[in-house]
Amino acid sequence: MITVFYDGKCGLCSKEINHYRRIAPAGIFDWQDITQSHDKLTASGVSLVDALRRIHVRNVDGQLLIGVDAFILLWKQLARWRWLALLVSLPIIKQCARVVYDQFANWRFNRLEHCQLADRSGNAHE
């Protein structure tokens, strides 16, 4: 299974993930809300703060993908989203998407209280 680690306390993140959950074929994804339990991710050396900042996805081989690469893997599994995965996988578009996603992820992280609380409480190294 592909494991998707997402911020369940973020309204935008939850809305997007819930959409994917509704359209995803059964048995492909294991959806993990890191605000409920981040043990699986921290066991891999990923801090709660890093997990809150960017989406993380573990592929079937156990490789951890972050940000745009995580979305590409996720979208490849969804019939109506495969075209976007192909488009965003193109080298120049992928580079631009990474810059835009990183800026957005940092902006979102800095605006959400639960992210700031995790950052201030020292969860950066859990």
Image: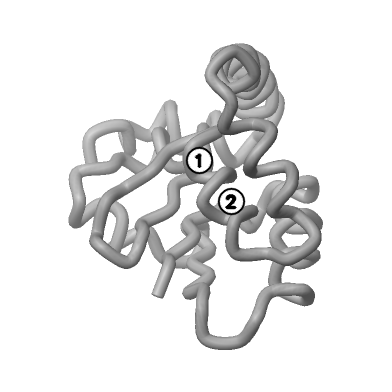
Residue 40 falls in image quadrant: bottom left
Of the 4 image quadrants, the one containing the N terminus is bottom left
- The front one of 106 and 124 is 106
Residue 69 image position (x, y, % from top left): 48, 37
Question: Does the CB distance between marks 1 and 2 fall below 8 Å?
Answer: yes
- Going by the numbered disc 2, the residue's amino acid type is Asp
In the figure, 119 relative to 78: above or below? Answer: above
The residue depicted at 80 percent of the width and 60 percent of the height is 80
Packing grade of label 2 (10 A; few <14, some 14-19, many >=20) is many
The residue wearing badge 2 is 7
At 68% across and 21% down in the image, what residue appears?
Answer: 104
Q: Earlier in the sequence, mark 1 or mark 2?
A: 2
Q: Secondary structure at mark 2?
A: loop
What residue is at 73 percent from the left and 42 percent from the top?
84
Front-lying residue, 72 or 6: 72
Q: Amino acid at mark 1?
A: Leu
Q: Which mark is residue 31?
A: none
Q: Is residue 117 visible?
A: no
Q: Which mark is residue 52?
A: 1
What is the distance, in whole Å, between disc 1 and disc 2 at their CAs? Answer: 6 Å
Looking at the image, residue 89 lies above or below residue 63: above
Residue 71: x %, y % from top left: 58, 45
**Quadrant location of residue 107?**
top right
Quadrant into which the C terminus falls: top left
